[in-house]
Every structure is written in C-alpha cells, then in structure tokens.
Amino acid sequence: MTTLALAACSNTKYLQKNQVLYVDSDVDVKGETSSAEKQDIRASLSSKQLMLQQSNTLFMGTRFKVWLYNQKYNEKKSNWFWNLMLAPRNLEEPVIYDSTKTKESVKRMVSYLNNQGYFYATVDYEESIKRQKVNVTYKVNTGKNFVINKIRYEIPDTNLLKLVKEHENLALIKSGMAYKQESLGSERERLMRVIRNAGYYKFDRNAIEFEIDTLHKILFRNLMNPFEGIVNVYNERKGQDMPKMDITIKIWNPEDSSLRYQQYTLDSIIVYPDYPVYGSTADSLFKTTQRKDLTIRYRQDILKPTVLYRAVILKKDERFSQQRTNDAISRLYDLGAWQFVNLQYRERQDTPNMLSTYIFMTPKRRQEIGANFEVSTSSDYLVGSGISLNYRHLNIGRSATQLNVSLNTGIELIRSQGSWMLQSQEIGGQVSLIFPRFITPFHIAQRSRSTTVRTRLTAGVDYLTRSAKFYISNVNASFGYEWNQSLYKRWIVKPISLNYVGVNLNAGFRDSIVNKNPYLKRSFEPAFIGGENVTYIYSNNDALHRNHYSYFRANVEESGAWLNGINSLWGSISGKGTDLESLTNMPIANFLKLEADYRHYWNLTGHTVLATRIYGGVGIPYGKSDVMPYIRQFTAGGPNSIRAWRLRTLGPGTFKDSSVTASNFPDQTGDMKLEGNIEYRFDLLRLFNGSINLKGATFLDMGNIWMLKKDTIRPGGEFRLQNLYRDLAVGTGAGLRLDFSFFLIRLDWGVPVKVPYYTGNKNGWYLSQWQLGDAAWRRNNIIWNVAIGYPF
C-alpha cells in the first residue's frame, strides 16, 4: 500500500513548469436524444479514434505504470526485482496535455456526430487545471437527429431491381428510422449478400451507392471519408421539429454498357482431401476417383468417397451462392478431419457463366494425446485437484468418425490438527464415438445440408469415495444427437441416457447421520436413472459482437418415463411377478430436472470486461420417488459458485450445519438453486516479456440452494418465495489471474457480505462483523480459491 501511495503523489514530480499531466476526461452530452442514445454517444466519443489524448491507466486509483516509468527513467532503478517489474509492457509514459490535440478531437467529434445524422451538433471543451494536473470536459450538444423519410431505388437492371424489392422487408434502413452512416454501410453489405447469393458471382459492393435527397451528391462511395459540408445543406430546415431526408439507392451497371450482370452456375466440383501446403494440381502423384458428380483427387485414401460426398454440400448445376460457399467451408471444418480448407472458383473459358469449383484441404493428424491438471482449493483444504488423460482418433475407419477416450483421477484433502488427510478420491473413465451423421432406425431427412449433425455414443464409469462416509459407483451410457441450428444456436438431444448408481455407506456414517434423516436416507438409495436429456445453447461470441455478447444454456432432464414402461413390460412378459426393479433390487428414479444459465459480457475497453451470470435450477421428483438422487442434487459454494463459502457448505436455505462432521466434511445439497454473479475483469501487468498476462478481478456473488419440501433435520432449508431475500447469501472479493494464453490459473479471495443464517444480525448483513485486522477472523472468514479457467 506504501508503493501505491507513493505512486499517487509522485506522478508530477518530474514534469517541467510549463507541463501539466492529463489525468481525466469527461463527455457531457445534451440534446434531443434518449438516455440510452446519450450513453452510446458518450462511449463513442471517448474512443481513441476521436479523443486523441487518453489519460494514463489506473490501478487501484493510482497511475501505477507511470510510477514504474519514473522508477526506470528518472530514479534509474536496476536490480533483478526492478528488471522484472520494469518490463516495457508495464510502463506508461506520462501523458502531457496538448491543447492542439484537444482541438483536433473536437473536429473529429463533430464529424462523427454529423455522420450519425446529428447535422446541427456542436462540441466545445473546458480545461480544469490544478497542481499540474488537468481534467478536460467536452461539452456536446447533439441538436436534432435527421429521420429517413423515403427510400427510392434507381437500378437499371430489371432483374436486380426485382431481386432487391423481393428482399426489401429485410432492409436495414427504413422510413422513420434515425439516420446513421453505419446503417448505410450495413445495408450495402446486406444488398451485396442478397445479390451474390442469387448467383451474381462478379457483383461487387462498389456498384452500390447512396444519394441523399435530390442534391445529386453521391456520398459514401468510400465510407471511411468524413461527412463534410452537409450541415450547410440542411441549414434551411432548422425550423423543422423532425428534419427528414430522402435516400436513393443506386446500383450501377458494369462499366462496359454492353454487359449485364450474369448469374453463374457450378459446373465440375473437384476435391483434394489431402492437398499439401505447397502442392500443385499438376502433381502426377494424385489419383482420381468419381463419386456421382464429385471428382476426388487424392494421394492417400484417407476418407471414404461416400463420406466425402456427403460432406461436400455444393452440387453440380446448382446456382452460385456466397452463403452456400461459406456453409460448405464451415461444414468441412466441422467434420474435424482437416487443418485448412480452401475453396476456389474458376470461370470456365469454353462455357459462359459456368464455374469450376476446387476444394483444397490439408488434413490434421489422425491421433492426439493430451493431459490436463486441475486444482481448486480454499483456505484450509485442497479441493478438486486431479489429472485427466485424453486420447482422440479423428478418423476411425476412414469415415471421419471420432473416438475419444478420457481417464481422470482426483483427490480432496482436508487440514486437520496440522496435518493433511485424505477427504475423498475419485477415479473414472469415458469412451465416446462421434459419427458425422444421424444414425436412426428409420430415415430422417436433414432439412439443411449445411447444418453439421453428429451422433454421439458414450459410455463411462466413475467411482467416488468419501472417507468414512460412503462409496458411490456410477456406470453411465447415453446415445444422442448434436447439431447447429444456426450460427449461434446449438442443440444436444439424448433420447437414451442411463445411469446405474450403486451406494455403499460406512456403518458409522449410516447409523449416526443417514438413518436419522429420512431425506438423506432416500437420497443415498441405489437407483436406476434412465430417461432423456435436451440441451439448447445460444452463443454469439464472434467478430460481429465485439462490444458485448451473450451465452445462454437451457437443459431439461427427465428420468423414469420410458424406463418404467420397460419395467412394466418386463413384469407382464415374465408373468412371475418379477420386473427390472425386483431383479436388481434397485428402484427407478423418477424426476424432472430443469436448468437455465444466462451470461452476458461487456468489453468496456480493450483491457476491461464486465461479466455477469444468472443461473437457476430445480429438480422435481415424481411418482414413486420423493427425493432427487444424490448425484443429481444441487450444491453451492466453491471456486465456480459463491466464492465466499467453501464447497458444499452453504444452505439449504437458512440452515447451517455446525456439527463436528460438517466442519471436517461439508456436504450440503438441495433440490433447487438460484445464483447470480457479477465480475469486473481488468489487465494489470505483462510478465516475462509478455508471455504471461497478470490480470485482476473484483466480484459479487449471490444465491443459495433450497429444499422443495420441509426437512425436519435441516430447519429453514425449504424454499419460500416470501423468504427469498432473507435466504440469499451474498459474497464479494477480489482475485488474480495468470493468463498463459492456452490456459488460465485463477486465485480468488471471497468474504461474506450477507449470510442467510443467524449471526447476531437478524437481517443477515455481515459487514458490521468484519474484523479484517484480526488474523483469526480472516482465517475463518476469508475464503481463498484456486482454479483453472474463469468461473463463467
């Protein structure tokens, strides 16, 4: 903290008398716009492209990197420690205020606002100088924004005009919309896609131009040029409440007036499944085979022709489409067998308007072996440390079928009386076969051949031992399908999912705890879990959503419906009063489990991210089952949940287990879970010449687990909507992350802010009981977690 204090007061020490440090800027936006629009304008005008001077970055309220810069170049610090800290990436030269850059920023801001349709915008600025530090406030008045009145088309080619009018309902500029320059750029790209997808292979975006009103001034031929001079054009309309403009969209014919835009058709389709990086199509080593209208030229027979024919969605005699081209490339990449895919069209010289299609593919290595090490821990015990080994074969039987084999083992350790003791251990393995098509007993027509579909067959076994408590064996198998509905939407459907859960209880644990709690006793009963599982995933994290993006996952699992049917049928056929349950001495678990997980991420700057998550889940037993199986119940706390509580120590509801067993072995579960998280992530320093990025975070977690029914052993554990506020646990904290690019190590410290159980304050707020100066209090209340990767 002493270092930060020095950094706060010494940043102006080495400035000359006529120099001032540029420490802050603000954009004050006024005008006839909504609050949301003003916020967007403020963010845009604060960008580096418009605001030419940016203040030095802050770390915990100080310009720490400027202080480091002064230590190197003014204090001349140099030893092994300073050489590590004073790497070039960690230094920032003090930003000396330059008023000429401020004036240039004003001009750019005005041009930007004009391009957004604010033709009457004005920008001014104020300087506030104190103790050789300056704050600049930009005073922005947007004035009135122009609204699009009419949209006309001037397209001499009647075929193109008809095509554009057919897709007019999808236009990105419409009458009544506020004018923005980027909307014209987006509309130009949309029109280009519509026309190229209709077969116009040679159509170019530069043929599309926009004309504003009847001034015959063609604008935006180059969208990077500033929108100059338009203010004077519209001065005569300043009296209008909502100034309007008309836009004419022009699509010019080719420069040679004798030519017209032509639609192209695909002719031959030639595929090179093992094309070398620096290969040549004239290579005599290539062999040729034909599969219907697909020509395959290969050196090694790495893939069956039928599989390749099914994977290449482009077909002879179909019309050229840019979207189909993109889908074809994506489909081949999704097959997982190729490192690179390059698709080229070549115009036939002997046949007009025909294209030969060449697909060059460089294969991946067929087999991969990997290993992962994971660890998560808290302040007094090590949790979830383990090793997993993975093997992948990407092309079983030359059919692009993938084989995945994984083995994993892990342990949990507790700290007891100054020594480490084994708390639990787990070992398991899983084998998956992934087929690049639907495998069904009957034919299913695939609605879109561009969609990647897979059939996954999985089998696995897992053994979990908790010292002096229980031993659970879980044998599982599933059969299901995966496909991408669109670029952002994905489905995983498992019509068959089976779990055999065997449980052996330690005699002492069974007699002292389980038998005294009917809920726990039923939870630990061996069971068959058999049913269906449907998962829907939406994620738009791509180049089109750089500023903010979302992730949503919904999962529905049902157990018992068709397994009960088999059980009844078995009993009817046997005729001896025996069925599946009586033969195995295991009941069939009947439940419905629903989960929803929504996350949203805001990239506030190039180095800061605000991440949010809200999660909800509920498990509802039905039929002969009145509790959820133990392995399907919810837990709270730990490195990926509410980090101010240790794993499995929180809940359910207001219940707190204060027994001796719980202090050494927390294991609270519930039928329902609600959780919300907010995390602010920021870059700190670059270490070891930039190979490691040290990042920081602050976070706020809240939530809990509950029972659906009253549990006499755990009072206060049942869910009541009127008690939701009281039952919520709230924790906060800070963390560090070591980002190695290919993986990330996370260290978080969490401390309770509001507890659901009674601690002397009836409303649960815990701030008044913080004793940060007490080492014993910190040891018992500040929880630290180590994990691999982000929590969400």
Image (cartoon, grey):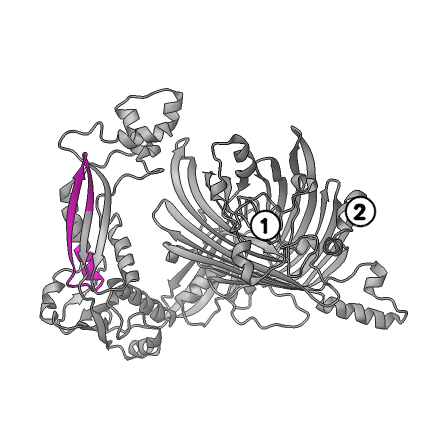
Asked whether, in this view, residue 612 is left or right of residue 247, the answer is right
Q: Amino acid at mark 1?
A: Ala
User: Residue 109: within the magenta?
Assistant: no
Asked whether, in this view, residue 147 is left or right of residue 687, the answer is left
Residues 470 and 327: in front is 470
Residues 779 and 436: in front is 779
Q: Quadrant of residue 212?
A: bottom left
User: Residue 135: within the magenta?
Assistant: yes
Residue 367 drawn at (x, y percent): 60, 46
Q: Residue 645, can we see it?
A: yes
Q: Residue at x 28, y 71 (%)?
A: 173
Asked whether, in this view, residue 367 is left or right of residue 52, the answer is right
Q: Nearer the viewer, mark 1 or mark 2?
A: 2
- Quadrant (top left, top right, bottom left, bottom right) of the N terminus: top left
Q: Is residue 134 above or below residue 16?
A: below
* Gap in angstroms between the C-alphas marked 1 and 2: 26 Å
Q: Residue at x 55, y 59 (%)?
A: 723
Q: Which mark is residue 636?
A: 1
Asked whether, in this view, residue 28 is left or right of residue 789, the answer is left
Q: Which mark is residue 255?
A: none
Q: Which residues are magenta?
A: 110-136
Neighbours of disc 1 within 10 Å: few (<14), some (14-19), many (20+): many
Q: Which mark is residue 511?
A: 2
Residue 591 drawn at (x, y percent): 68, 64
Q: Residue at x 22, y 54 (%)?
A: 28
Residues 148 and 459: in front is 148
Under tag 2, what secondary structure?
helix
